[in-house]
């Protein structure tokens, strides 16, 4: 009956039943298998088709990004989404001096330790909010200093800054860019910047795009780590941040702005030039 409805011969039907998978079918099956394996790795559930394609290429699987996107869509493999709830970490209602916007959304720099970006984010725990302050090198996108506290204050910003200075020993003239938060505009933070002969820069009021690469890091951190965990304590949140930054983001995570290499690998390549 099936053959009559489709108007094909029985011989053609049985030939189709016994047909071996084509080379294209076999290759696509391999790609789907690898995508599923990579997608199951820790924090790789948040990779979309561009990063997944680069991972496959790095492992010797020859394929196009469009093919990967198509196969992921057909097999319902997609990056996890994030909730819309957000807590403000910026208090710009203060009387401290505001630094000029020296960066002006110029996010392409050729050397490390030319521009550092910084900001705060929050991590919910059963004990209350924990706060993370991080510093990012704009050239390599590497997180070079970070600190956490149960209080979002100037001391937290200074702790992260001092860690970055100890690690990098940057030259005078370095631009340190932040939003207009009271922590970064405080007398103690401005003095530390001035004593190091750095230049302070601040975003325009209410303009998150002026610090977009830093916002991008926090978005990745939240989507790939925070939103899918429940932390019992501040200490547990600190361990999670350390694991994400030092064991995944800096050494492993493929960064689109770096042509899909990790920040550590990008810096290593710079040293070889």
Image (cartoon, rainbow, N blue to C red):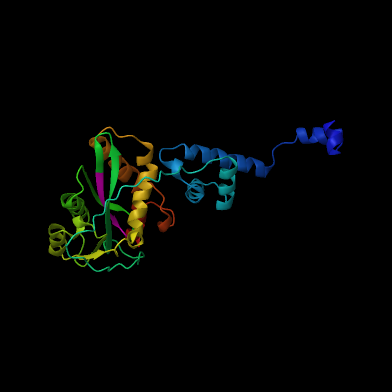
Looking at the image, the residue that sits furthest to the front is: 93
Q: Position of residue 157 (x, y in %)?
A: 20, 52
Q: Position of residue 222 (x, y in %)?
A: 36, 45
Image check: 35 left or right of 269? right
Q: Can residue 66 be spotted in the picture?
A: yes
Image check: 216 left or right of 154? right
At horizontal 86% and vertical 39% (from top left) the residue drawn is 7
- Quarter of the image for the C terminus: give it: bottom left
What stretch of residues is rendered in magenta? 131-138
At horizontal 64% and vertical 40% (from top left) the residue drawn is 26
Q: Is residue 271 above or below residue 130?
A: below
Q: Position of residue 58 (x, y in %)?
A: 48, 48
Looking at the image, the residue that sits furthest to the top is: 1
Q: Position of residue 41 (x, y in %)?
A: 44, 37
Towards the viewer: 227 or 224: 227
Q: Is residue 59 above or below residue 258?
A: above
Q: Is residue 132 magenta?
A: yes
Q: Can residue 265 be spotted in the picture?
A: no
Q: Is residue 223 magenta?
A: no
At horizontal 72% and vertical 36% (from top left) the residue drawn is 20
Q: Is residue 125 above or below residue 170?
A: above
Based on the displayed image, in which of its 4 quarters is residue 46 positioned? top left
Towards the viewer: 51 or 56: 51
- Quarter of the image for the N terminus: give it: top right
Based on the displayed image, in which of its 4 quarters is residue 130 positioned? top left
Image mark count: 0
- What main secondary structure does the magenta stretch of the protein show? strand
Towards the viewer: 33 or 242: 242
Towards the viewer: 203 or 86: 86
């Amino acid at each position: 009956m099936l053959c009559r409805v489709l108007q094909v011969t029985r011989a053609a039907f049985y030939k189709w039943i016994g047909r071996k998978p084509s080379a294209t079918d076999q290759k696509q099956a391999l790609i789907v298998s690898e995508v599923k394996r990579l997608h199951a790795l820790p924090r790789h559930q948040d990779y979309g088709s561009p990063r997944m394609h680069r991972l496959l290429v790095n492992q010797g699987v020859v394929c196009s990004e469009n093919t990967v996107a198509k196969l992921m869509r057909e097999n319902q493999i997609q990056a996890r989404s994030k909730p819309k709830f957000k807590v403000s970490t910026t208090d710009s209602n203060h009387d401290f001096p505001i630094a000029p916007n020296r960066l002006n959304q110029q996010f392409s720099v050729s050397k490390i330790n030319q521009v550092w970006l910084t900001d705060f984010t929050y991590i919910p725990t059963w004990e209350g909010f924990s706060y993370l302050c991080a510093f990012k090198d704009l050239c390599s996108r590497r997180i070079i200093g970070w600190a956490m506290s149960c209080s979002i204050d100037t001391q937290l910003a200074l702790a992260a800054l001092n860690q970055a200075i100890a690690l990098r020993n940057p030259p005078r003239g370095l631009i340190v860019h932040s939003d207009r938060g009271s922590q970064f505009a405080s007398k103690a933070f401005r003095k530390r910047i001035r004593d190091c002969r750095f230049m302070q820069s601040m975003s325009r009021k209410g303009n998150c795009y002026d610090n977009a690469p830093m916002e991008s890091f926090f978005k990745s951190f939240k989507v790939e780590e925070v939103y899918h965990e429940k932390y019992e304590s501040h200490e547990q949140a600190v361990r999670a941040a350390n694991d994400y930054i030092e064991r995944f983001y800096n050494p492993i995570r493929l960064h689109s702005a770096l042509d899909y290499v990790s920040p550590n690998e990008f810096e290593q390549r710079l040293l070889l030039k």
